[in-house]
Amino acid sequence: MSDDLYQRLGVSRTASQDEIKKAYRKLAKELHPDLNPGKPDIEERFKGITAAYDILSDPERRGRYDRGEIDASGQERPEQRFYREYAEDPSAGRFYTQEGFADEESLHAFFSDLFGARAGREGRGGREGMRMRMRGADVSYTLPITFLEAAKGAKKRVMVGGEQSIDLTIPAGVRDRQTLRLKGQGMPGFEGGPPGDAYVEVHIQPHAFFERKDNDIHLELPVSLAEAVLGSRIQVPTIDGPVSMTVPKGSNTGATLRLRGKGIVDPGSGRRGDQYVHLKVVLPKKPDAELEKLVEQWAKTHAYDPRADMERR
C-alpha cells in the first residue's frame, strides 16, 4: 500500500475537496468489505483509502500532511513536532504539545525550573517551599468511525495519554466532526490538582451507498427493467439489515419510495428519521439481441417523447 495518501485515492496533490470525496466514494463502492466478504486484501485496501480520506477530507489536517508535519497515519513527525508554536518564545527552554505538557515529568520539570529560579532570586527563606496546585491540561484527539457506527452507536477502544486505553461510547446519531468529552482523561494535574479532560472529535467515513441528510438516509437503488415495468417485491439494504419493499408497476428512474422509521435516531428527541429509496433503472451490461428486437417492435406502435417537458421550458 502506498505511503502517499493522494496515490491511494488516485488523485493529484492539487485535487479539490470535491474531487477527493468523489474518488473515495468510487473506491469505497468497489472495495467495501460488505461487498467483498472473505477477501482480507480488499479489506486492507479499504482501510487504507479510508485512512487517506480521513486526513485529506479535513483541510487543516491535509495542510499539515502537505507541509510534512504529520505522516500518512496522522502522527506527528518528530522533526516537526512542537517547534512551530514555541520556537520564537524567548522563555521556551523546552517544547510541549498543543494539548499541554508532553508528560507529567515534563510538567513538574517546568514548574521546578520556574519556581526554583524565582526562589533563588528571593532568597532561601522566601518562597523556596512554595507549591502550586494546578489542573491538568486538556488533550484532543480525532477518531475515524464508520457510517454504521455513527448511525447505530458503538463501543470503541481508544488510546489516551499515549499508553492508557479506555472504552469510548459512540452515541447513536452522532454527527460528523462532533466532539465527545472524556472527563478526567486528560493530562495529570500538578501537585495534587485534578486531571484535565480528553476531547475526541469523530470523523465519519462516507458509506458505499448510504447518505445521511439530517436524520434521514438516502439510497440510490438499482432495479432491473423487468422489476421497473412489471413491479416486484425486492430486498433493500438498511442500517438494520435488508427489508422487503414493493416496487410499483411502471416505476421509473428517479422515483422515490419511503421506508418509514428506517433512518437515524435523533439523540435529542429520540425520534427516528426515514429512509428514502431512489430507484435507478439499469439495463443489462451486455447487449441482448432478444431485448433489442422486442423493444424495436414495441416502439413502432408506442412512440413517446421523454424530453417533451424540457422542450416546453
Image (spheres, helix red, strand yellow):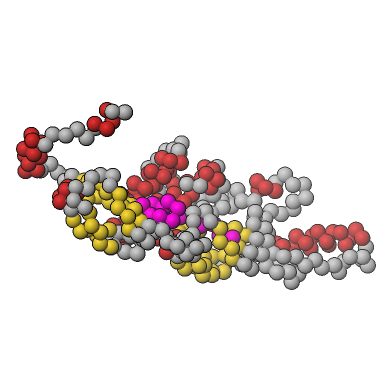
Residue nearest the observer in this picture, 286 or 125: 286
Magenta-drawn stretch contains 212: yes
Q: Main secondary structure of the magenta part?
A: strand
Q: Residue at x 85, y 67 (%)?
A: 130
- Rendering coords of residue 106 (x, y %): 70, 62
Magenta-drawn stretch contains 294: no
Please indicate whether residue 53 sits to the left or right of residue 234 in the image.
Answer: right
| Residue projecting furthest to the bottom | 192
Q: Which image quarter: residue 283?
A: top left
Please indicate whether residue 206 sits to the left or right of residue 221 in the image.
Answer: right
- Rendering coords of residue 137 (x, y %): 68, 61
Residue nearest the observer in this picture, 20 or 295: 295
Residue nearest the observer in this picture, 49 or 89: 49
Please indicate whether residue 259 sits to the left or right of residue 96 in the image.
Answer: left
Q: Tell me where the magenta segment starts and ends, as one range.
A: 199-218
- Rendering coords of residue 161 (x, y %): 60, 64
Quarter of the figure that contains the C terminus: top left
